[in-house]
Amino acid sequence: MDPLFLGSHPGMDFLNTTLSPGGTPIELIGDGDAFVAWLEAAGLLGGVGAAALRKRFPRAALDAAAAQAREFRQWAAEWIERWRTSPGSHSPADVRRLNALLARAKLYREALPAGGALELAERCRVDSADDLVSLVVAPVALLLTQARPELVKRCAGHACTLWFLDRTKAHGRRFCSAAACGNRAKVAAFRERQRG
């Protein structure tokens, strides 16, 4: 299955790398190759090509990084769920763990052409496969520090498990996708009205 980028935020898109449409679990970062492919599709590799990473690091190291990312995703999802229902509920242990993961990132700045000017970008250096996990930690940390908890939502679609950040003007977004879950809800409501 192709990655889904419906979350309106990289942290939400990372949480959506596991989903259960119709109750059947699907893992989008089940191994190192899939994790690197997802990082590339999400634009988180910062110019480092997925093919170059696959050549540079052994498969076992990439698989271990994917396992760490899945473990981080589970922990982050549980924390975000608590936080969105009870804002301000950040436990000191969670904050310490997040800070320890953030400290693993090896950051540098790079000037990049942007139109006719230069733009300063912050990049993460990837010296080992373990460094790949820091690429998903930063977006989750940004979500927890900059988003409003009431705008972090789960899709209202039947059996949908996807997350999103509601960036709509009236904050009335209910579905991960209007074309998918939103349309199914409209069809179901129409059928219910027809029966009545």
Image: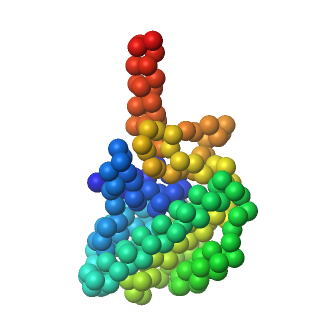
Q: Classify residue 32 by image quadrant.
A: bottom left
Q: Nearer the viewer, residue 51 or 39?
A: 39
Task: Give the residue drawn at x 51%, y 51%.
Answer: 163
Marker count (numbered): 0
Position of residue 174 relative to residue 127, above or below, is: above
Q: Which of these two is toward me, 24 or 116?
A: 24
Q: Height in image: 13 above or below 64?
A: above
- Pinpoint residue 52: horizontal percent, then vertical percent: 30, 78
Q: Is residue 132 left or right of residue 79?
A: left
Q: Is residue 34 visible to us here? A: yes
The residue lying at 31 percent from left, 78 percent from top is: 63
Q: Residue at x 38, y 75 (%)?
A: 67
Does 80 sit above or below residue 167?
below
Quadrant of res 82: bottom right
The image shows residue 176 at horizontal and vertical percentages of 48, 44
Q: Residue furthest right?
A: 88
Image color mode: rainbow
Asked whether residue 110 appears in the rendered view, the answer is no
Residue 174, position in %: x, y?
55, 38
Image location of residue 109, percent across then percent down: 56, 79
Q: Quadrant of the N terminus?
A: bottom left
Q: If the image is split into quadrants, where does the C terminus sit?
A: top left
Hey, which residue is sitting farthest bottom in the picture?
127
Taking the spot 43% from the left edge, 53% from the top edge, the residue there is: 5
